Image (spheres, rainbow, N blue to C red):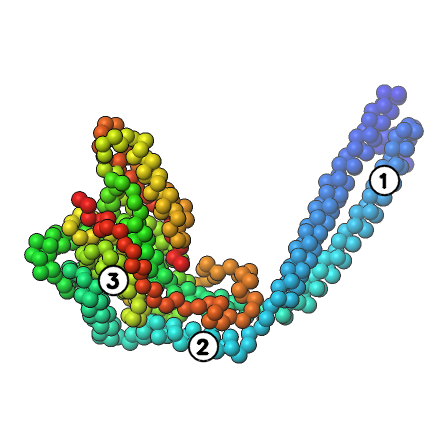
Amino acid sequence: MMVRSKWINWGAWLGLLLGLIFYLFGYFLPTVKTINRVKRETRDARLRVSDFRRVSERFKSSDQAERRFFQDIDKRLTDFLPGIRDRSEYQRRRDEGFSIIVSRARRSGVSDLLLAYESDAGAEMKVERRLASADRLRASMFTAQFATQRNECHRWLVDGASPPMDVNLDGMNGRSFCLVFAAKLKHGLGLLNSLPWGIAGLQLDRCLLMGKGRLPFFVVLVKMHFRDFAQPPRVPGGGNGTIDENAPLLLSPLNRFQAPMVSFRPLPSQFGGDIFCGE
Amino acid sequence: MKRPWGNNWKPPLALRFAMIGLVLALLAVTVLVQGWRSAARSEWRRAQAELAALAGSASRIRQTKSERIACLKKLQFMNFPGQYAFSLADFVRRLSLATIPGIVYSEWRVEPEAPLYRFVLRGRLLPDKGVDRETARARLLELVDQISEFPGVGEVIAEDNLPAGPGFLHFTVSGRVEPE
């Protein structure tokens, strides 16, 4: 009888222990976990409220001047990206761009220049020699150098230019071409610096500068952006790109002093030697 | 009624105290925890109510901020070509002014990753009389130092390939630049 009662006692202690464990895992720990979650959410909400109050104290709403500034930027963007309705308009604008580049190159003292672009059928690369040096040896060296880079130019054209910055604009499109020229460093760099100015939507992309001949040899992939009315509207890109959403700049109305347009800067006149033609 | 443990079993005193103590302790803990939980919940409700009250003006601020961000992005888009072209040309101009004896550049490649661009510069150091391996490397490091001081240049990495015997030190210097 005593032995049986001892076992029952052990069983009762065990029952107590099991009850305690059940309480701990079934009620106590889940409730503490819930409380911690609720406290964390409360803390987050309080932080958001205090952050928001701090921001709203410094925040200034849009005013008329800022509205005008936005309209001005939109107008400049429309001028910056010409609208193209069809292929012939694109060809006309491209040829105008080529003519401007060639006349600038001539003025800059570039001796040899050619343009490589995908033919309108898009199947093969078309090459147009626009400037050829009077020095026949120099001209033939330029041709030989281009021959070594021809495949790379074609690859660049096929791959296309790097994606533009994340700007939402309906029907934004672009076509690339390669500009290949040989010039003294000072003249070549002057041409490079002037390229995006005065030709709507022009942007330099990849660039290669080599020194295997008597003059530095430049290969530049250029992209011509435009608004293509024939294309369906571009799906707006997400994200803010490089602009920090919490930047203090965003708290007050923008104006042309805070967000200035860059204008043409000529290169300083100090140059060293022609470092890319030492071979 | 017959109990499973028999009608004759009487729990010992320690067990009785433990049972009663445990039940009381668990009751007390439960009351405390419930109080704690309801306090936390009411704080949470208050915080959410404050947040909800600010939602209207928050959305107005968000809207204005997104208009400003869109405007800045358009400006960046229009400014980048000019800044990029100037930065490319100025980089090479400054490189031409860098005075490292015996250096010859063979190739300079650039690839834009708006709003930055990546460059790779290849070249070699010509052997000079009395120029040993260490001197050649020191000259390369001097070039890297000079390039690092160009405007907008971030991290610059240099690799060299020096043959075991006498010969050129071929090098590659790469890095990223933020046009200014």
Residue at (19%, 69%) from the top-left corner?
A103
Tags 3 and 1 both on a single chain: no
Q: Is residue B170 left or right of residue A40?
A: left
Indicate which disc residue B25 carries.
1
- B85 relative to A231, above or below: above
Of badges 3 and 1, the one in the foreground is 3
- Which of pointers 1 and 2 indicates the residue nearer the eye? 2
Q: Nearer the viewer, residue B48 or B154?
A: B154
> Quadrant of the rendered structure where residue A78 is?
bottom left
What amino acid is labelled 2 in the image?
A: Gln
- Residue A191 shows which numbered tag? 3
SS state under label 2: helix
**Residue A205 seen in the figure:** no
Q: Label 1 is placed on what type of residue? A: Ala
Q: Secondary structure at mark 1?
A: helix
Query: Is any atom of residue A237 visible in this view?
Result: yes
Quadrant where the image shows the N terminus of chain B: top right
Q: Looking at the rendering, in which quadrant would you find the C terminus of chain B?
A: bottom left
- Residue found 35% across the figure and 39% down from its top: B141
Sequence-earlier tag: 2 or 3: 2
Q: Which mark is residue A71?
A: 2
Of badges 2 and 3, the one in the foreground is 3
| A5 with respect to A271 (left or right) | right
Q: CA distance from mark 1 to mark 2?
A: 71 Å
